[in-house]
């Protein structure tokens, strides 16, 4: 059982909207336009204890979830620059999430930030306590809400992506689609749950101490009545959703022997 936060971590705004911040209301609803006054709210082991492995001492300092404060230096620089400008952030893109019986859209926000170590201009992407910086050179179209995704395809000669029109599904598959959307909406409706399901298939040194490698999403899907094990539409949906991509061309185009690029 995950330790509960003392603050609200619900990301639901209104009846069908989702914010990209840690919460829609309360102390964790801070944004680059209204930044927190203290670094206390970056101390995830205190404000988001539910994202950590139960063996972690929650009295430790885990800024932005990292065991080493130096690993999160660019985020302290990012928020520090914003504070010095009195909340005058440089937004590039922002989208509220949407959830209903017919669609789910994930929330996302992007802000301009120059990495001090390299003096390189780029974007900080924000979603429910997770951050990623990517250079403008590698992702030049973020302001238009567009990114290029990279994925390794091992020894395959082609990459196939599941595509369909929901209104053309059979009644049985439409019900599977409805359940799938419900699971995705549940994942995105709480920042702790969102954070944990994002990391549930990852198990790396960078995520040590987090609730990684839990396969929590699979458990949620099964509990919702989705058959993600047997051959069929439910399995196809889940496999497609769990494929991982990179925003960094170094990972997709140089590190892996074969890769696919999705615009």
Image (cartoon, rainbow, N blue to C red):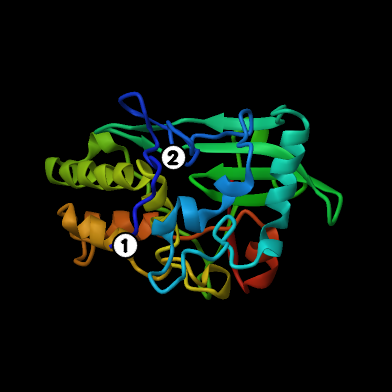
Q: Position of residue 211 (x, y in %)?
A: 41, 66
- Residue lying at the far top of the rendered structure: 14
| Residue under the point 40% across and 64% down | 200
Tell me if 110 is positioned left or right of 167 in this view.
right
Q: Earlier in the sequence, mark 2 or mark 1?
A: 2
Residue 231 falls in which quadrant of the image? bottom left
Tell me if 190 is positioned left or right of 229 in this view.
right
Q: Position of residue 223 (x, y in %)?
A: 17, 57
| Residue under the point 71% across and 63% down | 70
Q: Position of residue 171 (x, y in %)?
A: 13, 40
Residue 232 falls in which quadrant of the image? bottom left
Q: Secondary structure at mark 1?
A: helix
Q: Position of residue 83 (x, y in %)?
A: 72, 35
Q: Which mark is residue 216?
A: 1
Q: Which residue bears the numbered disc 2?
A: 106
Tell me if 182 is positioned left or right of 175 in this view.
right
| Residue under the point 45% across and 62% down | 199
Q: Secondary structure at mark 2?
A: loop
Q: Quadrant of the C terminus?
A: top right
- Residue lying at the far right of the rendered structure: 119
């Amino acid at each position: 059982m995950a330790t509960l936060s003392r603050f609200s971590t619900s990301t639901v705004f209104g009846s069908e909207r989702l914010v990209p911040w840690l919460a829609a209301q309360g102390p964790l609803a801070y944004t680059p336009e209204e930044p927190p006054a203290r670094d206390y709210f970056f101390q995830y082991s205190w404000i988001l204890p539910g994202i950590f492995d139960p063996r972690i001492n929650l009295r430790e300092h885990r800024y932005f979830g990292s065991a080493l404060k130096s690993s999160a230096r660019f985020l302290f620089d990012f928020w520090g620059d914003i504070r010095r400008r009195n909340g005058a952030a440089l937004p590039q893109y922002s989208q509220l999430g949407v959830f209903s019986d017919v669609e789910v859209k994930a929330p996302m926000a992007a802000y301009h930030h120059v990495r001090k170590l390299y003096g390189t201009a780029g974007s900080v992407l924000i979603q429910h306590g997770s951050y990623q910086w990517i250079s403008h050179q590698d992702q030049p179209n973020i302001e238009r809400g567009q990114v290029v995704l990279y994925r390794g395809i091992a020894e395959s000669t082609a990459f196939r992506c599941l595509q369909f029109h929901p209104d053309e599904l059979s009644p049985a598959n439409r019900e599977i689609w409805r359940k799938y959307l419900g699971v995705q909406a549940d994942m995105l409706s709480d920042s702790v749950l969102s954070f944990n399901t994002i990391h549930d298939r990852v198990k790396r040194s960078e995520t040590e101490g987090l609730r990684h490698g839990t396969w929590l999403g699979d458990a949620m899907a099964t509990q919702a009545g989705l058959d993600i094990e047997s051959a069929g539409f439910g399995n196809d949906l889940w496999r497609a959703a769990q494929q991982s991509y990179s925003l960094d061309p170094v990972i997709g185009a140089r590190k892996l022997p074969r890769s696919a690029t999705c615009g």
